[in-house]
Amino acid sequence: MTKKQQKFIFVTGGVISSLGKGIAAASIGNILENRGLTITFQKFDPYINIDPGTMNPFQHGEVYVTEDGTETDLDLGHYERFTNVSLSKLNNYTTGKIYYSVISKERRGDYLGNTIQVVPHITNEIKEKIVEIAKNVDVAIIEIGGTVGDIESLPFLEAIRQMRNDFGAENTIYIHLTYVPYIQSADELKTKPTQHSVKQLREIGIQPDILLCRTEKEISKEMKEKISLFCNVPVDAVITARDVPSIYEVPLIFHHEGLDDKIIELLNIWTRKPEFKEWTALLERIKNPQGNVTIGIVGKYVDLKESYKSLSEALFHGGIAHNVKVKLEYIDATLLEKNKGINKLKKADGILVPGGFGDRGIDGKIKAIKYAREHRIPYFGICLGMQLAVIEIARNVCKLKNASSTEFNPRCEYNVIDLMEEQKEVKDLGGSMRLGAYPCKILKNSKAYEAYEDEMISERHRHRYEFNNKFKDDFTKHGVLFSGRYVQRNLVEIIELEDHPFFLACQFHPELKSKPLNPHPLFRTFIKASLEQKKALLTTNAPP
Ligand code: GLN
């Protein structure tokens, strides 16, 4: 039997950052899956950190966690949401990881006698990772982080340049995402930035095969011809990537622009006819909501939507499940501490406290949780949001004065949230939390069971602290239901309040597994409860 030919799509970006390269790559995966191809993704991040795990969300945005517990770039979240792939540590490499691997080999003596250099040692290491990931799929989509022209991306670009020689033109294609700005004063789209970006790519030896032109307006045929001429790309490979209200529309835009046809022609690959029925139906639902619901997210990074990417998507998916639009109201926890922002809290049909680290803003979040509990507003707590719900209940229901987590007060008397034994031994902070997928047993007759309709589930984690089982009886006496447990270690995974329309909090991060075609059960039920809350309020406030 002949070995299957490996095929690669390399996605680069130019002109400016934040053009949506991750969504473009994810959409390419989506359209290829919809033609029956098996795919995977790999993202290379040019920074030197081993992973984004220890980076501030202001620097990096959300840290996405894979099943195997790797802390990765948020683009991997887009890849998983847009397609059926399941990713792992092999799907995200940073410069730091690549160098770490080369330096470890050097220390072991693997290169005895040689001077270790960027070319060929670093570039070979990068190529090995790419070849490895492409082993069992029809096409591997490789995204290079950063923008062409950055010093840091050069070894990655050099590695993918070499791959055309190694694998041939039919098996390697280069897709470049660029920007065609609209200049208001001239009432014109401008192609010059794209020309310069492609020129830079060509200087390092890469001639793009396809251009994705991010733009506000439709690009005319004449303009495509101009781009084609100056960038040396066939005109049918100049694709308009117009701004759209929903990111989930991008695959359909690409398909209508003929991107999948072009890719399979260049890769010389046979596929079935495109099948976009499910995705088109999804978009119809997104575009025609039958109402809306407002969710208040009480957090510390409210100005930085990128740090709650998976969360806002999962809430949006919860809305899709009920045909409603979910309006997100970000509420700054530090303002709540100063008694500001209460009005925003009052406007919310449901309140959510997401994950987080450190003690800034925690009193504001606890205030919001107390408000939700006392006013019987649906509450959904995630990770830190569960820990703070535990603290709120401990202080105000169980009357455990100043109860806290040892994360915020290492010497507190009522340490209702505490470090696990093995976490006490941890010296290096990178990659050492409870990370990745763990099984969880769900108690029947609980809200969690109503949502999952299953007794055994699995969810992803990213935290160090846990509920302190010493206090379990006290909480049970005060109406707390421990409805999810990691049996093997007897760790609390989900808590609920029995006498409340919806008060549920979990130690894991369910947002990481929600998809538009398959909204996560907990988000689905939280949105449902919030909708019921809204309806109840409308009836009470209705004129007689
Ligand atoms: N800071 C808490 C912990 O480490 C919660 C982490 C989180 O919300 N992801 O356990």
Image (tube, rainbow, N blue to C red):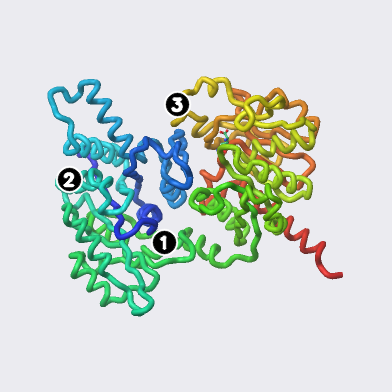
Mark 2 lies on residue? 162
Residue 397: x and y in percent read: 79, 36
Q: Nearer the viewer, residue 462 or 345?
A: 345
- Residue at which label 1 appears: 250
Residue 53 in which image quadrant: top left
Q: Which three-letter amino acid code belongs to the residue tagged 1?
A: Val
- Identify the secondary structure beneath mark 3: loop
Residue 319 visible to an observer of this rendering: yes
Please state, as top left, top right, bottom left or bottom right, where the N terminus lies in the image.
top left
Q: Nearer the viewer, residue 157 or 404?
A: 404
Write the residue at 21% across / 49% down: 171
Q: Residues within 10 Å of mark 1 (few under 14, many from 20)?
A: many
Give the farthest residue toward the bottom.
186
Q: CA gap, disc 3 to disc 1?
A: 41 Å
Mark closer to the chain start, 1 or 2: 2
Q: Is residue 427 above or below residue 538?
A: above
Task: Report whether 248 appears left or right of 417.
Answer: left
Q: Is residue 93 above or below residue 338?
A: above
**Which mark sits nearer the N-terminus, 3 or 1?**
1
| Residue 464 percent coordinates (x, y) | 55, 30
Instruction: State which quarter of the image contains the C terminus.
Output: bottom right
Q: Position of residue 541 (x, y in %)?
A: 81, 64
Residue corresponding to mark 3 = 428
Q: Residue 100, percent across and down?
A: 30, 31
For the residues labelled 2 and 3, the Cα–Cα distance comes to: 37 Å
The Cα atoms of the two marked residues, 1 and 2, are separated by 30 Å
Residue at image coords 41%, 59%: 275
Disc 3 residue type (three-letter): Asp
Q: Which of the two residues, 449 or 239, is positioned nearer the viewer here?
A: 239
Which residue ends up furthest to the front in the rendered image?
338
Taking the image as four quarters, which one is ligand 1 found in? top right
